[in-house]
Amino acid sequence: MSRLIIRNASLLSFNNGFKTGNDTLAIESGRIIAIGRWNELEPLAEAGTELIDAGGKALLPGFNDSHIHIWKVGNLKTFMLDVRSAKSMEEMLDMIGDYHRQNPQLGWITCRGFNEAGWKEGRMPDKSDLDKITTKKPIFLIRTCAHIAAANSKALELSAIDADTPVPPGGVMQIGKDGIPNGIFSETALGLVSKHIPAYTKDELKIMIRAARQQFYSLGITAATDPAVDPLLLQAYHEMNLSGEMGLRVNAIPILLPDGGERPFDLPEYFVSDWFSVNTVKFFSDGGLSGKTAALKRTYKNTAEHGVLRLQRAQYLELGRAALENGLGLATHAIGDAAIEFVIGCYQELSKPFPGNIKRIEHLGLPEEKHLNAMAAAGIATSMQTIFISELGKNFRQYLDQQYLDHCYPVKSVLQHGILTALSSDAPVVSDLNPLKGVAAAVTRRDNEGFEIAPHEAIRVEAALKGYTLSAAAISGNAKMGTLEPGQYADLVMLDKDPMQVDASELSSIKVEKTYINGICVYQA
């Protein structure tokens, strides 16, 4: 591979010891080989070297989304209907109806993305709503959070669901006033229906991964962690890695407890390569704030609901211990304060014999001060989503009391406790997975309607960018990316404006000019 030198760039990196004022970066064989001033590195521009003048534009490590469902992002571009744009129940039902008529070959109609908080109806769709589209073909409609879903009568029939159907622990099946299921399922109960939907093939999963990858390139995302990977998807990733077609640094976190399943999946093997790694396993301890299924100590505003605590302690400890014994780390979804407390308690018990294994909490929506102290003491890291403030802020304002709202996704407090904190999108829970939108949300704490949520938890641009680069690499256990240093992967993003130099209101409008992976330009605006 020939040498590449990028000069006249505004180099940004967030590692200790990085020298400001450097403007040139040299790459060879997929790695950064030198950083400095052009007059110092000009002798490296030997015959055959490709020389690029960046024109003063910002060049920084490629963005790393530390919690994004890669295949699900791609699925909404390929095999599943995306209804996130629907502004009302009626509009969503029309979209599904059109999709049903245009795709008569489909055995099931699967859709994702509704958010009832933004609708005038303000309620969840149920069986009766979906039956208006058809009662002859099954429909499974997943909420944007993926913790709640609705099914029509045909889907219930094919899944053999009635009022006497046993509901798995950590799940809820709603019963209507007529005494029979109304088609709404939460948390583990989704599996009562989803396990009857024909599974995607490995080839279809690979199509989804490639579709998502193209979008990632355009946003400067060069690495990502896919949480909750099932065994078939894990096989697809391994095959893509073996054949050299990953095209993206992927850290997979296999799930151990399938929704609605009676037995856990087998433990995956620890695996690390340049393009693909498996070093952690995933659990879900609760649901999401936007759908009122995250497990809270107090109730959601104007309700008697506390959310859903999904895990059973004995089984969680048993599976977690087995994973740690096999050299794997633990990543647990915990959003509500009740769930966070439960998970930290289990991590503390498991940390004593396995102090060095990765232990991370996904989301960390409503931690208390004592939780942050305990996390810092136990070396527990977190991947948080400031982008939720933007896209789901209306839900938070509608469902959380003021005390909860005032420390919702408290990134500044988490960082002040010295906790390793990466930022991420959790897409397709949100539609905008642009890291710079996540940076803007972390800095402004404004939702898409202009309301501030816990503005005292705002962080500086530098800290937010670090969350998408250096800290994201650290939480995934990969020390070869996330910074601009000799020896690091040459995974880079060039921006049309320097995010350190613009007003906060301009951050999300910054455009990606070029994306490099392994020193090769994979995207150019």
Image (cartoon, grey):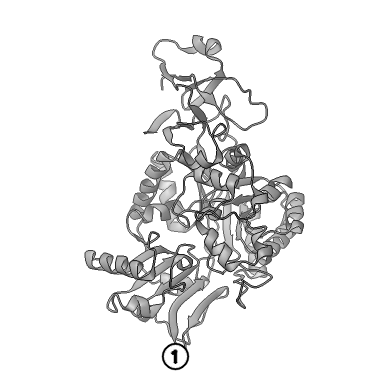
Please tell me which residue lies in front, 516 or 177. Answer: 177
> Residue 158: where, in percent of width, then height?
35, 78
Q: Residue at x 61, y 45 (%)?
A: 475
User: Considering the numbered disc 1 on the image, is that residue within a helix, a strand or a loop?
Assistant: loop
Q: Residue at x 40, y 10 (%)?
A: 47
Are there few (<14), some (14-19), or many (20+) residues within 10 Å of tag 1? Answer: few
> Residue 322: where, in percent of width, then height?
63, 59
Q: Determine whether 78 is above or below 402 in the image.
A: above
The extreme bottom residue here reads 178
Q: Which residue is drawn at 41% across and 22% down?
A: 1
Q: Determine whether 174 is above or below 468 in the image.
A: below
> Residue 277: where, in percent of width, then height?
52, 44
Q: Determine whether 222 is above or below 2 in the image.
A: below
Residue 274 in sight from this viewpoint: yes
Specify the quadrant of the image occupied by residue 331: bottom right
Q: Residue at x 50, y 79 (%)?
A: 173
Q: How many labels does the image show?
A: 1
Q: Looking at the figure, which quarter contains the C terminus?
A: top left
Please tell me which residue lies in front, 146 or 313. Answer: 146
* Amino acid of disc 1: Asp
| Residue 271 in the figure: left or right of residue 365 | left
Q: Determine whether 37 is above or below 489 in the image.
A: above
> Residue 254: where, in percent of width, then height?
52, 55
| Residue 155 in the figure: left or right of residue 510 | left
The extreme front residue here reads 450
Residue 155 in sight from this viewpoint: no
Task: Give the residue number, with chain letter if any, for mark 1.
Answer: 178
